[in-house]
Image (cartoon, grey):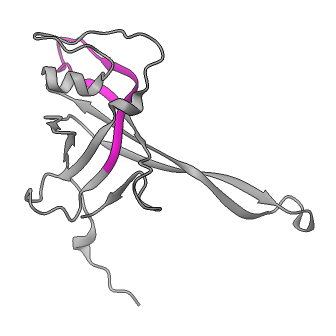
Amino acid sequence: MTQRNMTNILGGPCAVRIGDVDAGHTVGETRLSVTPILRERREDATGQTVTDLIHLGDTVRLTMRVAEWTLETLSLIYPLGADGPSGLGIGSEPGRHLAALAETMVLHPLELDDADTSHDVIFWKAVAVGSVSVGYASDADRVFDVEFLMLPDATRSDGERIGRIGA
């Protein structure tokens, strides 16, 4: 029987770096979701019973709440905006390819030293997608809710086209 080890149960917040930019303080849970896209195969001999699953790809998303209002973090959460000396523009011409704006994303558990990358999660191409929302209220901080989609990197080997866990 395998012996259980309580030290293998991990918890706690992480630092998020996108490209060369630290996303700064986050609030609440940073949530990673990896969803395989599968096609079911059925055969006449087995009726409607699924006999195999064919992998068609993966959808990898990360949601987080960014708390720091800096030009760098604003550029991360809305990459289509035009950077200016004192702000970030909103609105862009249609037809832009977001893959060209994708950056490497690294999630690093805060309880580990910077040199310990054993539990880092690395994505080769991450880009902010979907709506970016922020609440204005007297009883809460203004934080940005943002979602990132991970894109594949064809230069990486099979099984690591989107990213990897651990150094």
As drawn, is 127 to the left or to the right of 136?
right
User: Is residue 143 visible to the viewer in this orientation of the structure?
Assistant: no
Picture residue at 32% right of the left edge, 80% below the top? 4
In which quadrant of the rendered image does the C terminus lie? bottom left
Q: Is-magenta flag for residue 86?
A: no
Residue 147 drawn above or below residue 74: below
From the top left corner, tell me how far across and down residue 74 is, in percent: 21, 21
Q: Which residues make up the magenta segment?
A: 123-146
Where residue 12 sits: x, y (%)? 20, 52
One can see residue 164 in this view: yes
Left or right of 49 on screen, residue 67: left
Picture layout, residue 33 above or below residue 132:
below
Overall secondary structure of the magenta stretch? strand
Q: Quadrant of residue 17?
A: top left
Residue name at image x 18 percent, y 35 percent: 23
Foreground of the two, 75 or 98 = 98
Q: Position of residue 72 (x, y in %)?
A: 15, 25
Picture coordinates of residue 131 (x, y %)? 40, 21
Can you say which quadrant of the picture contains the N terminus?
A: bottom left
